[in-house]
Image (cartoon, rainbow, N blue to C red):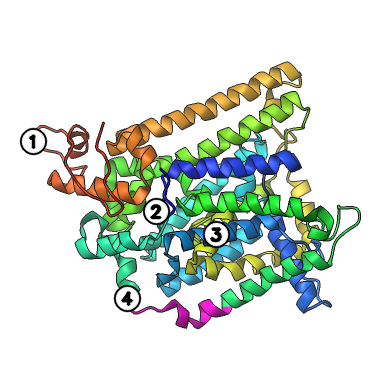
Amino acid sequence: MLSLRKQWPFWVSGVFVGVAEIMNYVVLEKPIGLTTGLVEMTAAFEQTVAPDVDWWSRAYDPNVHWIIIGVVLGAWLVARAEGESRGWVKYPTKELVLAFIGGFVFSFGTRLAHGCTTHHFLGGLPSMSTASLLYLTTILPAGFLTFYLMSVMKIGHVFKGQENKPTAELGAEQGGKMALDGLACEASRNYNPNRDWLRISILVFMFAFFGNAIVGSFVYGTEDGLFGWNYAVSSIGWAMMFWFLLIGMVAGVGMAKTGFGTECAFMTPEVSMGLEHKENFFEKKWKIPGSTRFMFRSMSPFTAIFIEILLLWGAIMIGWQFYDIKLPLGMNPTWVLLLGAACQGFGSVAMIGCEIRTYMRLGLGYMTAVAAFPGFLLGYLPYTLYQDFWEDLARDTTITKVKHVPDIFSHDPAIQALVGLAYGLMVAGLLYWSIKRGMRMTGYSFKDLMSNNNDDLAIKYFDRMAKNGSSQNDRDDTGETEDKKARTSKPAGRGYGGPVTEST
């Protein structure tokens, strides 16, 4: 049973985000888009406080984006239900500076790539977009380089899917393989977020920013529904406003209860391969916390995002084949798009979250998300102030005019449908592979991984390793790894969130 007071298994977020995407597709015939909504709200704020300035509004009309507001609200409700805001964490100053820079670079990258990770990963991959597939090849190397940069800066310990306080307290008290999780608790002992002037200042600005968009939606509107405040309540009505708000809340709750993110999902296979052979390298040299090392080892983020991709792919296939809805998110891949992907790879890891995850983390109170928020807004300026330059450069650097995978093989509808089905089978195969690999890498059963949250499983996993007397990668005299031996044993153990079974 999914408890409101506890975190949920990772895979659940894939279902929640997938359902939210389908809800958006049903009414708009396209996946969720976020970053344009934020810059439109920025234009709205600009027109309110400085009507004679057009730094943002020269490129984007003022508007409100209910899905973004819903994500923040859904995550805030999760914090209330669990009784734990993540605002208790005191991050190193250099990480907050890095988060701000990451927000700036990420935001600029979204304009060059004409979409953020939500657009390309959560929407583009299910849409079989060639631009999104090429985007994937560039954002990942940039993400890994930033992952390495954080380790060189000696702040790898802040890289956590969720900063749950009970886990941090346990790590601080017991040490061992979870010792790095405890650093947050130790650094935050004398920290009072209610006296952090920087945090309070940005939060006041953030409330004014979102409040302006909400109030404006009752004041302004547009007759044709194409320009201006086209998502204002006066334009779309109360029912549609609540529908979009609900979409955001569904996604926000699912992510906030698990730590779902796009950037860590696609880094998971590669990091897990490294962990399989060099666990101590990630622990001792890169200083990556135990809960994060286990998250990658279990393949859970990869599993969750492929559940989302498969769900939305199914809805898009139905719309395409039975309702004659064109495949969405068709765009020409360009070299400028790949530059934007590289910017987002850096930004998403530096912020410890992609764009939609950062909105979720705002709702939970993470200071890294609070620090990144002003960077988001300022990061649009290099594009909006020189929009014509970037648009012309994009047109001049087109890689291919093939917009969707089925178009690569044929323009015959029957063959395209078969290619679409094959694409879905490939996604299903990757989902199956991720689950099986996670079971093998952790020694947990399918039931264990599907019914327990990441931190509970991580605590149990490292407790099991300790009971076996050495690291999971140390070999005994027979050459058998302790990891392999652990998978055939069932020692007792207890995580902070309750018992976890050890069936294999």
Q: Position of residue 392 (x, y in %)?
A: 80, 53
Between the C-alphas of marks 2 and 1, the distance is 42 Å
Q: Which mark is residue 110?
A: none
Q: Residues within 10 Å of mark 2 (few under 14, many from 20)?
A: some
Is 478 within the magenta? no
Callout in the foreground (2, 4): 2
Q: Position of residue 203 (x, y in %)?
A: 57, 74
Tell whether 71 sits left or right of 172: right
Q: Position of residue 84 (x, y in %)?
A: 42, 64
Q: Which mark is residue 477?
A: 1
Q: Position of residue 191 (x, y in %)?
A: 38, 78
> Residue sitting at 75 percent across and 19 percent down?
413
Q: Which residues are magenta?
A: 189-201
Between the C-alphas of marks 4 and 3, the distance is 25 Å
In the rendered image, the vertical position of residue 485 relative to residue 363, given as above or below: above
Q: Secondary structure at mark 2?
A: loop
Please name the residue that numbered disc 3 is placed on: 358
Please name the residue that numbered disc 4 is placed on: 189
Seen as rendered, the residue at the extreme top is 414
Q: Amino acid at mark 4?
A: Arg
Q: Amino acid at mark 3?
A: Thr
Q: Which mark is residue 6?
A: 2
Q: Tell me, yes or no, whether the two marked residues, 1 and 3, touch with CB atoms within 8 Å.
A: no
> Residue sitting at 75 percent across and 56 percent down?
390
Q: Tell me, yes or no, whether the two marked residues, 2 and 1, touch with CB atoms within 8 Å.
A: no
N-term mark: 2 or 3: 2
Residue 383 visible somewhere in the drawing:
no
